């Protein structure tokens, strides 16, 4: 019987829906607050889609009555009653009545609801926000999502050329310029979105490639390499062709091992330049270092750091002091730090035998020989009687 009744209604041109309880979460009761109107309309729209085959949804007249059943409160009761009376008048009037299956009944209800409860200030706020919206910190996806949200609230058609222009103006200037430089310029909203995403991906790939190239780049072999002692010595030889450079000067300019020191003592060579005829403290090479333009000259310590030291007399054997005479010597920073201290060098001559001494004295200059003989006489040694 129920099926026959439904078929009879269908035969009369009216839609047929299922019966039974409605499914899904029912919308909250709307009390007429403007700030809740959009949320309530969205909830009822979802509830309607879930029950689209139900007779209360299929029939426009019943759909309006169902929506009115979720409205109550002092701020909406009068509007609700007026809507119910207008709905019945449309279907029961004597001239040009509307069928209860006419979708115009629902369209009129939606229009009246929007006019009565839509927050018009919210729409204006959405328009203002949309006009000021800009892409920030390269976050393209967030900009696209916000633009579409505010465009919908403002009632803008996203496919309209004015709306597309607003979207392009809000993009990063460099990104928008890259989109316009494409062979095919974007026109619609979807084309602009796709072009912007592709250009941003190209930019990200370029930055990644440049970073990898920077990390793997290396200087050619030999660039910025420090010069070796050998190269430095050869350079000095070209500047002073008359100077004598022995092999040891090329490999190591100073004596560092005990074996080398012992060999130099035997041959009477200087610890600095490896030549004969003088010791390290009188080495011309050592003095030339102080005159080099690229080396800072030694800075003397303040006078309060000077100290008195007894006068010393130097011999090939040892150093002894005369306690009766004293003088003030300036303490040179370079002399204090020099590993080839004169004291250590000359004390080492005490270990030499006679043949070593003969070799040493034979290398003296005439002036050194006179000084040495004088020093020996001061010690009480008389070569004539000896």
Image (spheres, helix red, strand yellow):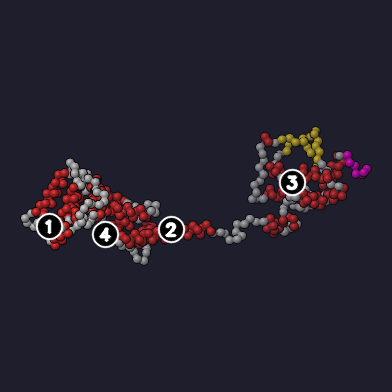
- The foreground one among 206 and 312 is 206
Crowding around mark 4 (Cα neighbors within 10 Å: few <14, some 14 to 19, many 20+) is few
**Residue 129, image x, y percentages:** 29, 50
Residue 177 visible in the snapshot: no
| Secondary structure state at the residue bearing disc 1 | loop
Task: Tell me where the magenta segment starts and ends, as one range.
Answer: 380-386
Task: Please tell me in which quadrant of the rendered image residue 239 appears.
Answer: bottom right
The disc, 1 or 4, on the residue closer to the chain's N-terminal end is 1
**Residue 315, image x, y percentages:** 82, 43
The residue pinned by badge 3 equals: 340
The residue pinned by badge 2 equals: 204
Which residue is farthest bottom?
Answer: 183
Crowding around mark 3 (Cα neighbors within 10 Å: few <14, some 14 to 19, many 20+) is some
The residue pinned by badge 1 equals: 99
Residue at 27% over, 54% down:
152
Dot label at residue 160: 4
The CA distance from mark 2 to mark 1 is 61 Å
The CA distance from mark 2 to mark 3 is 62 Å
Kindly report which numbered mark, 2 or 1, lies closer to the viewer in this rendering: 1
Which residue is farthest right?
Answer: 385
The disc, 2 or 3, on the residue closer to the chain's N-terminal end is 2
Residue 54 visible in the snapshot: yes
Which residue is farthest top?
Answer: 324
């Amino acid at each position: 019987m129920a099926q026959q009744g439904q078929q009879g209604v269908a035969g009369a041109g009216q839609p047929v829906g299922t019966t039974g309880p409605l499914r899904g979460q029912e919308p909250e009761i709307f009390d007429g607050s403007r700030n809740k109107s959009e949320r309530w309309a969205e909830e009822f729209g979802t509830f309607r889609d879930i029950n689209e085959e139900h007779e209360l949804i299929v029939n426009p007249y019943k759909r309006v009555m169902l929506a009115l059943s979720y409205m109550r409160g002092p701020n909406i009761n009068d509007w609700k009653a007026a809507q119910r009376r207008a709905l019945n008048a449309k279907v029961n009037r004597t001239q040009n009545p509307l069928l209860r299956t006419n979708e115009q009944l629902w369209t009129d209800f939606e229009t009246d609801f929007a006019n009565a409860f839509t927050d018009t200030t919210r729409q204006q706020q959405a328009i203002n926000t949309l006009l000021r919206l800009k892409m920030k910190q390269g976050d393209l996806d967030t900009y696209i999502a916000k633009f579409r949200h505010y465009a919908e609230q403002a009632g803008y058609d996203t496919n309209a050329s004015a709306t597309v222009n607003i979207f392009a103006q809000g993009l990063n200037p460099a990104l928008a310029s890259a989109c316009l430089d494409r062979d095919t310029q974007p026109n619609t909203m979807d084309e602009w979105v796709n072009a912007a995403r592709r250009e941003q991906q190209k930019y990200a790939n370029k930055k990644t490639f440049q970073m990898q190239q920077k990390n793997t780049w290396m200087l050619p072999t030999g660039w910025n390499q420090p010069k070796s002692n050998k190269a430095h010595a050869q350079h000095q030889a070209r500047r002073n062709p008359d100077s004598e450079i022995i092999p040891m000067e090329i490999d190591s300019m100073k004596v560092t091992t005990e074996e080398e020191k012992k060999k130099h003592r035997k041959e009477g060579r200087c610890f600095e330049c490896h030549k004969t005829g003088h010791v390290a403290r009188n080495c011309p090479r050592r003095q030339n270092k102080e005159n080099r333009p690229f080396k800072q000259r030694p800075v003397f310590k303040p006078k309060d750091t000077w100290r008195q030291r007894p006068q010393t007399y130097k011999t090939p054997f040892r150093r002894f002091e005369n306690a009766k005479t004293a003088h003030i010597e300036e303490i040179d920073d370079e002399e204090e730090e020099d590993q080839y201290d004169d004291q250590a060098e000359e004390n080492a001559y005490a270990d030499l035998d006679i043949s070593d001494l003969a070799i040493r004295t034979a290398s003296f200059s005439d002036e050194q020989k006179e000084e040495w003989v004088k020093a020996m006489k001061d010690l009480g040694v008389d070569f004539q009687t000896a």
